[in-house]
Image: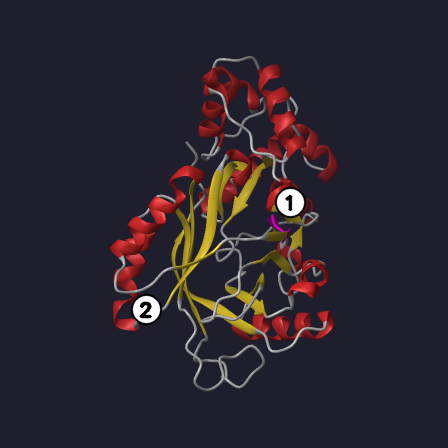
Amino acid sequence: MMVLDEQEATALVALQRGIALTERPFAKLGETCGLSEEAVLALIQRLKAAGDARRFGAVFDARRLGYASALCAMTVPRVKLAEIAAKVANVSGVTHAYERGWPTELPVSLPGGPGAGKNWPNLWFTLAAPSKDFASELETLRAECQPYAIHALPATRRFKIDVVFDVRTRDRDERVEPRLPLLKEHLQVVEPTVLEKAIVHLMQDDLPVCSRFFSPLAQQVGVDEATLLEKLGAWQASGVLRRVGLLLRHREIGFKANGMCCWDVPETEIQEMGRRVASFPEVTHCYERPRMDIFPFRLYAMIHTPTWQGTQQLFEHIGREAGLSQGQLLLSLTEFKKTSMQFF
């Protein structure tokens, strides 16, 4: 990770939270950080050139665009893991795929460790597809991966999403925009027009940055700048568009030890416990998912720190402070795929 001064570090956080939907968004962002428009644009280019930034573009809510998604879990022998992971990663609707487990550097007896005799799923990935196609795409992948079963765990309640990394507090936390719990029945799914699909298709990619950022994008989809900004503003208000901003490569900037925290919580307590866990600034994502016999947990949360030990200690701290016990921490040992969702 390149060295940033205080103003650049402030701008980096602001860029992740998302630019304003206005004619000169980088000038407006720079005003709040004490930087010129040119300095903000140069910072983005430097981050991209250094490999610290994954892309600059729009982040959409998949479910509000008519897509279904699920976290999927598999138990695969280590000698077959790379082969099966390659099949999973080859699917366009798979955006994240990791080997998750317990590193040899940590004692298995630590809180969150597997303990004796536990054999949890070790290959975890996310699959997304248009709702009408999701079941068939999952079945096709299941056939590809036989004889190893794929268990789908769609989120039934979302407590927190949208991570913002702050390199100034890398050893302590990550700043995440607060969001209220979202249930499936609260979703308002849009039926995109041809023009709206074109806008999504364009803005989901890595976009060139310039002073009048939205003007060339509007030209590419055949509308004027004001029309595009109006559409994006309406989408942002309804939750279809989460933000237009910078997405970083968390491993490259020092957040290398990714961990999935899981606790078994009674149905009557899930909303309260989910809100407690989501309130920690260190938690980047927090969901309720179905409980499985082979993995008996209902509450899931993601955390990152620079070290395995730091992530284990953070898991222990969150569980203790939230009043949760008997949880499991699965650390991301190998990254097989990490990319942004591609719509339409």
Residue 13 at least partly seen: yes
Q: Which mark is residue 76?
A: 2
Tag 1, which secondary structure?
Answer: helix
Horizontal side, residue 265 vs residue 154: left or right? right
Tell me the residue at 70%/75% (across/down): 320
The overriding secondary structure of the stretch rendered in magenta is: strand
Residue 190 vs 247, above or below: the answer is: above
Do labels 2 and 1 touch, CB within 8 Å? no
Quarter of image, res 92: top left
Residue highlighted by disc 1: 8
Residue 27 vs 125, above or below: the answer is: above
Residue 161 is covered by the magenta coloring: yes
Among the two numbered marks 2 and 1 on one chain, the one whose residue lies closer to the N terminus: 1
Q: Amino acid at mark 2?
A: Val
Label 2: how many Cα within 10 Å (few below 14, some 14–19, many 20+)? many
Give, as a single range, the part of the protein colored magenta.
159-163
What percent of the width, then of the height, locates residue 124? 42, 61
Q: Amino acid at mark 1?
A: Glu
Residue 104 vs 37, above or below: the answer is: below
Cα separation between marks 2 and 1:
44 Å
Residue 32 is covered by the magenta coloring: no
What percent of the width, then of the height, locates residue 77? 30, 72
Horizontal side, residue 145 vs residue 284: left or right? left
Q: Which mark is residue 245?
A: none
Tag 2, which secondary structure?
Answer: loop
Position of the C terminus by quadrant: top left
